[in-house]
Amino acid sequence: MKIKCCKTNLLAVQDTMDILKGRWKVQIIAALCYNKMRFSDFQKEIEGISAKMLSSELKDLEVNQLLTRTVLNTQPISVEYELTDYGRTLKKIIENLAEWGIEHRKKIIGKVPEITEN
């Protein structure tokens, strides 16, 4: 579907940015694109996010129907998060952002840093 009206397009982009705004939401969604995650997994994966901010961002993403929160019957109780089908529609956008970011880093810095797994 091609959007003809520039104003409509700008409004659609604004709506998208309102949902994904902030430093952490896109990173949370990107982390969930491939696996379910527990709260502690996010804290290990997303450097610099506080527990309070993570909790707030997860709640907001749940309200916007992008992820589901499942309380597991474990001792102690743990919670698992995963993208909804609707949330998974963002996967292509996340992949495009990652590709653009890699190319941008190459253009500006000249190389992509090597990432070592912990």
Image (cartoon, rainbow, N blue to C red):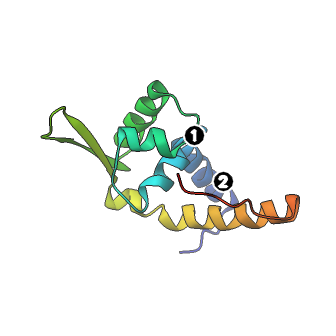
Dot 2 corresponds to which residue? 10
70 with respect to 57 (left or right): left
Residue under the image location 72 percent in, 64 percent down: 102
- Label 1 amino acid? Glu
Q: Residue 80: percent from the left, percent from the top?
A: 28, 45
Mark 2 secondary-structure assignment:
helix
Q: Quadrant of residue 48?
A: top right
Q: Quadrant of residue 97?
A: bottom right
Q: Depth check: 108 or 60 in front?
A: 108
14 with respect to 78 (left or right): right
Q: Residue 34: percent from the left, percent from the top?
A: 41, 63
Q: Nearer the viewer, mark 1 or mark 2?
A: 1
Q: Residue furthest bottom?
A: 1
On residue 47, the disc is 1
Q: Residues within 10 Å of mark 2 (few under 14, many from 20)?
A: few
Q: Residue 18: percent from the left, percent from the top?
A: 56, 41
- Label 2 amino acid? Leu
Mark 1 secondary-structure assignment:
loop
